[in-house]
Amino acid sequence: MNSAVHPPVAEHNSNLLLAALPPQDMARMLPLLNQVTVEAGQVLCEAGNPIEHIYFPHDCLVSLLGVVEGRMTLEVGQVGREGMLGVTTALGHDTTQVRAVVQRAGSASRMEGARFRAEVERNPALQRVLYRYTDALLAQAIQIAVCSRFHVLEARLARSLLVTRDRLQSDRFHLTHEFLAHALGVRRVGVTKAASALQQQGLINYSRGNIEILDPDGLAAASCTCYQIVREAGAMSVAQET
């Protein structure tokens, strides 16, 4: 086996979903995984296209965007080291339902879609981990949809920034106005106004896409209750089985 193609288990275990697998199941998957680097703005999959690869992020962050009429988008979820991109393959889907865009560059473990489907069918431990994660991802998408319909933009932006902070485990990250506008389903001017309001309250510092969260507790108070629900759903997805 070529160690340059298949990095040590410890590197793949940077992804919490893979780390939740029993050692023997992880060992069986190891030859099927490659470590790859993804760049900010890179489209990993497009809605309606075949699922060619499955991604398990290590330190990158991927935004899942629902697409309407090929151009209008709304973020319906995020995938970081707690999960994976392409989980619907485990449910028998051969095509992706979202556009997946890299929000923060980094590395990920990647597997061919066909091989992943075969592994899911024969691996009960992997099935349990994936079903738990799928349930959490669905709960996240539902809550974001509700949030987008009923809550003001300022609170939605606060929620989105806090979720990003949790996924990256960092108070500093880069998000452009354009990306946030696509993610929140609004015009860039709306993002500018909402970000300015949060900045005037001393909650964030936002300059040329560089975001620093100055007051996490204050930002959580400015957010809606959807943030806590999405956060709890994410925590459930990586909880160890008992």
Image (cartoon, grey):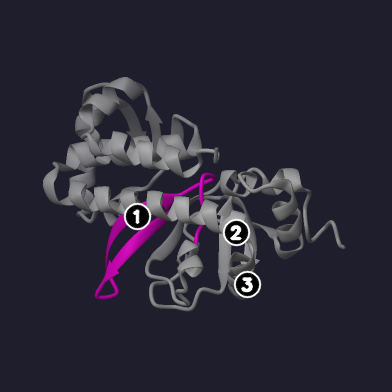
Q: Write down the region rendered in magenta.
A: 63-85
For the residue labelled by badge 3, is the local secondary structure a helix, a strand or a loop?
A: helix
Q: Can the viewer see residue 98 in this picture?
A: yes
- Seen in the picture, residue 103 relative to 5 is either above or below; the reply is above
Disc 1: which residue: 138
Mark toward the start of the polypeptide (3 vs 2)? 3
Prevailing secondary structure of the magenta residues = strand
Residue type indicated by callout 3:
Ala
Q: Residues within 10 Å of mark 2 (few under 14, many from 20)?
A: few
For the residue labelled by badge 1, is the local secondary structure a helix, a strand or a loop?
A: helix
Mark toward the start of the polypeptide (2 vs 1)? 2
**69 and 237: which one is in front?**
237
Mark toward the start of the polypeptide (3 vs 1)? 3
Residue type indicated by callout 2:
Pro
Q: Which mark is residue 237?
A: none
Name the residue: 55% across, 37% down: 242
**24 and 10: which one is in front?**
24
Q: Position of residue 128 (x, y in %)?
A: 53, 54
Residue type indicated by callout 1:
Leu
Q: Can the viewer see residue 59 in this picture?
A: no
Name the residue: 42% across, 35% down: 165
- Seen in the picture, residue 134 relative to 94 is either above or below; the reply is above
Distance between the alpha carbons at the discs numbered 2 and 1: 21 Å
Q: Position of residue 191 (x, y in %)?
A: 23, 45
Q: Residues within 10 Å of mark 3 (few under 14, many from 20)?
A: few
Total residue callouts: 3
Disc 2: which residue: 124
Disc 3: which residue: 118
Kindly report which numbered mark, 3 or 1, lies closer to the viewer in this rendering. 3
